[in-house]
Structure formats: structure tokens, C-alpha cells
Image: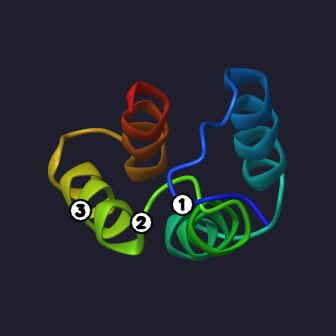
Amino acid sequence: MPTPDAPIGLRTLFLLFLRIGLSFGAGTGMSAVLQEELVRKRQAISRGEFMTLYGLARLVPSGSMTALAVAVGYR
């Protein structure tokens, strides 16, 4: 099991967002799958940090998932 805040490669992150983007569902459903992958399974970020990034992504004038992808990729 990975340690908390384990680094995740950009290729892995790209493939994760691609797989989620090709799945069925809107932004809210996609964010739940993304939270499951990044917080629980991979432990790449904490739940609190994910929720903060998601909340900020909802505020900016763009697609929420696009903003969340940029924020997670930047982090």
C-alpha cells in the first residue's frame, strides 16, 4: 500500500483522467471516481486537500473537471 502523499507520475495521472473522461457520467460522478482513485486507492493526496481543490475548481469559470485536472497535475 502506498504511503500518504505518494508521488504520482504525469503519465499515470494522464491515463487516469483519460479513463475517467471516457467513462459514462457527468462531472459530479467523475469527481467521485477520481476521489476514490486519488485519495483511497493511490493515497496521492489527502481527502481534505482533494475537497479543497474540488471546491476551488467549482469556482473558476471553466469546466470543473478541467480545473480539477489542472490543480491535481500542478500539485
Residue 29 horizontal side relative to residue 61, left or right:
right
Q: How far apart are marks 1 and 2 (CA)?
A: 7 Å
Residues at marks 1 and 2 touching, judged by CB atoms closer than 8 Å? yes
Look at label 1 and name its amino acid: Pro
Label pair 3/1, CB-CB below 8 angstroms: no
Residue 52 higher or lower than 70, as above or below: below
Q: Quadrant of residue 38?
A: bottom right
* Mark sitting earlier along the chain (2/3): 2
Quadrant of the drawing holding the C terminus: top left
Which of 59/36 is in front?
Answer: 36
Q: What element carries label 3?
A: helix
Comes first in the chain, label 1 or label 2: 1
**Looking at this view, is 30 or 13 the one in front?**
13
Say if 17 sits above or below 41 in the image: above
**Where, by quadrant of the figure, is residue 10 drawn?**
top right
Q: Do the residues labelled 2 and 3 touch (CB within 8 Å)?
A: no
Hey, what amino acid is under mark 3?
Thr
The image shows residue 45, relative to residue 16, as above or below, that is: below
- Report the disc number at residue 4: 1
Please tell me which residue is depicted at 82% across the width and 35% down the height of the picture: 15
Q: Position of residue 29 (x, y in %)?
A: 60, 76
Q: Is mark 2 on a helix, strand or loop?
A: loop
